[in-house]
């Protein structure tokens, strides 16, 4: 085991640089970035309090956290001092999450930050399905223009004449079935109501937080997917892809229950809809609607009823900015207070604000084993550390404990070493702020890690 004297190292560095290391160890929280992160997000980090860079040499100390977009992170890139990793985006499959859990490092993401972008494309797609927009535009460019040989006087006559081929219907008064009522689904519900549609929603595992975002009195709820399938003129899907659960959620059996003219919108994942079953429905004439998606399907490519777009759902400037802003805020909350929100491997953990600024907050990652918490609190008792408040949460093999101590320990470094020696379940620990004579939430975190974790 060893103690990482990173705070001390930063103090020395800060003094050498003429900083205020005499008052506190560590002149800034250092955050290593990968990829081009939106400046809107990077600007969230207060200057001076945070040192943020993609270049190790430009950081004020070893990185305490990492922020990235698509960079495929290697375990070897994660310095022993790193205590959190945030991805600007929803997916985290470019991060070795399992290894990070073993190393006691929470991985965060930014769920819902791109929800408005997807919602707007869904609204657009309702109209792409209801009116001959894509087909009409293709006809003008590829048929009329070609057949009339670029002769504008003839083209304008044809444009009037051929409009009859592309008549549509209106979406007002029609019924939209929304499967999945989370960040995107709830926004789609509200937009559709605003357009005068009737909305029926289905989400058997809806969270309480998501339920609060729904206009419960203005929409109807399907307790069973079939209830939605039977009444919907449009069906839009906003559930995660989960093998064995949402794989082919809309299959041949489900399609049999739908109205023949149903339009399908899929901006979730391609595999949620069984493309072969949809194609069979179109080719037999049993289904006469359209299928709009930003995912390709091998059975439907080139089919005239399938309007497929590049994977554009979240591709807006604003979505990137929102993701980066949310990532920065999540990370700052974690570094400054120990709070864990939007983590894919750690439990949500929110401790009430620190009551006593002369005390110290100790954040401990430990293995989720019986007796671990008792060991930790008993040990702190033997060290004359009075606990003012604490929270202990767990998720899978990881447990996270945040403890506010009444007093700053005389030697935090020695205390962390002794804690680790006494409690084998402890993976890492971190004091925040006040041990370095700062208010809680100011730079001055202090790390401890085991040798065998590196
Ligand atoms: N096209 C794109 O570019 C794009 C962008 C972002 C997200 N997405 C996709 O959209 C999906 C939804 O995103 P979100 O931000 O709304 O996620 P979210 O987690 O906020 O919402 C998902 C909802 O689905 C519900 N759900 C889970 N399993 C279900 C089931 N079997 N039946 C019905 N409901 C179920 C959950 O309760 C939750 O309310 C994502 O999983 C992702 O695959 C696509």
Image (cartoon, helix red, strand yellow):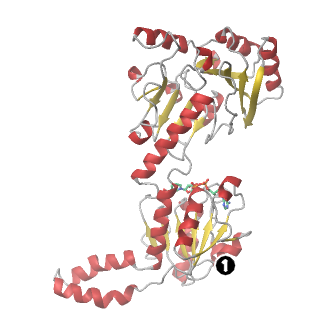
Percent across and percent down for residue 431 are: 63, 20
Q: Is residue 298 visible?
A: no
Q: Which residue is drawn at the image coordinates 68% and 36% (left, top)? A: 350
Kindly state the secondary structure of the residue where label 1 is placed: helix
Q: Nearer the viewer, residue 45 or 171?
A: 45
Q: Which residue is drawn at the image coordinates 68% and 66% (left, top)? A: 216
Percent across and percent down for residue 220 are: 68, 72
Q: Is residue 103 visible?
A: yes
Q: Which residue is drawn at the image coordinates 44% and 32% (left, top)? A: 33
Percent across and percent down for residue 241 are: 60, 56
Classed neighbour count for the residue bearing mark 1: other residues with Cα under 10 Å, few (<14), some (14–19), many (≥20): some
Q: Quadrant of the N terminus?
A: top right
Q: Tell me: residue 443, above or below residue 239.
A: above
Q: Nearer the viewer, residue 283 or 131?
A: 131
- Left or right, 379 with reference to 15: right
Task: Choose top left, top right, bottom left or bottom right for residue 48.
Answer: top left
- Left or right, 255 with reference to 65: right
Number of numbered discs present? 1
Task: Choose top left, top right, bottom left or bottom right for residue 223.
Answer: bottom right
For ligand 1, tell me if the residue under mark 1 lies within 8 Å: no
- Left or right, 209 with reference to 305: right
Q: Tell me: residue 189, above or below residue 40.
A: below
Q: Quadrant of the C terminus?
A: top right
Q: Nearer the viewer, residue 256 or 90?
A: 90
Q: Nearer the viewer, residue 328 or 235?
A: 328
Q: Tell me: residue 90, above or below residue 188.
A: above
In terms of image quarters, where does ligand 1 lie?
Answer: bottom right
Percent across and percent down for residue 321 are: 43, 46
Q: Tell me: residue 195, above or below residue 247.
A: below
Disc 1 marks which residue?
A: 230
């Amino acid at each position: 085991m060893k103690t990482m004297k990173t705070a001390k190292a930063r103090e020395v560095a800060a003094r050498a640089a003429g900083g205020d290391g005499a008052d506190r160890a560590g002149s800034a929280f250092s955050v290593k970035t990968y990829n081009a992160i939106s400046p809107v997000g990077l600007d969230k980090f207060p200057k001076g309090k945070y040192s943020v860079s993609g270049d190790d040499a430009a950081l004020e100390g070893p990185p305490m956290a990492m922020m990235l977009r698509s960079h495929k992170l290697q375990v070897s890139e994660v310095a022993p001092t790193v205590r959190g990793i945030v991805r600007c985006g929803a997916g985290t499959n470019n991060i070795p999450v399992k290894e990070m859990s073993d190393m006691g490092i929470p991985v965060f993401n930014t769920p819902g930050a791109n929800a408005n972008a997807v919602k707007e494309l869904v609204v657009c797609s309702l109209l792409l399905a209801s009116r001959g927009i894509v087909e009409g535009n293709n006809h003008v460019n590829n048929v009329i223009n070609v057949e009339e040989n670029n002769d504008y006087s003839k083209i304008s006559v044809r444009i009037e004449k051929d409009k009859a081929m592309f008549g549509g219907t209106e979406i007002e008064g029609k019924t939209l079935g929304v499967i999945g009522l989370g960040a995107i689904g709830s926004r789609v519900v509200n937009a559709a109501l605003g357009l005068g549609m009737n909305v029926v929603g289905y989400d058997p595992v809806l969270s309480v937080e998501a339920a609060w975002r729904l206009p419960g009195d203005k929409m109807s709820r399907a307790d069973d997917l079939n209830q939605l399938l039977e009444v919907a003129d449009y069906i839009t899907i906003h559930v995660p892809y989960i093998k064995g659960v949402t794989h082919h959620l809309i299959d041949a059996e489900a399609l049999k229950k739908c109205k023949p003219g149903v339009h399908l919108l899929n901006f979730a994942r391609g595999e949620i809809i069984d493309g072969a079953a949809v194609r069979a429905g179109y080719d037999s004439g049993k289904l006469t609607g359209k299928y709009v998606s930003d995912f390709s399907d091998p059975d439907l490519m080139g089919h005239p009823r399938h309007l497929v777009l590049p994977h554009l759902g979240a591709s807006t400037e604003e979505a990137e900015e929102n993701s980066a802003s949310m990532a920065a805020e999540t990370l700052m909350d974690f570094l400054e207070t120990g709070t864990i929100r939007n983590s894919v491997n750690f439990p949500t953990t929110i401790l009430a604000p620190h009551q006593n600024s002369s005390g110290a907050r100790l954040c401990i990652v430990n293995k989720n084993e019986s007796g671990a918490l008792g060991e930790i609190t008993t040990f702190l008792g033997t060290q004359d550390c009075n606990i003012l408040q604490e929270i202990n949460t767990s998720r899978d093999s990881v447990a996270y404990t945040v403890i506010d101590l009444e007093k700053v320990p005389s030697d935090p470094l020695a205390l962390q070493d002794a804690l680790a020696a006494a409690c084998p379940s402890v993976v890492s620990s971190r004091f925040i702020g006040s041990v370095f004579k700062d208010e809680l939430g100011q730079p001055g975190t202090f790390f401890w890690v085991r040798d065998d974790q590196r």
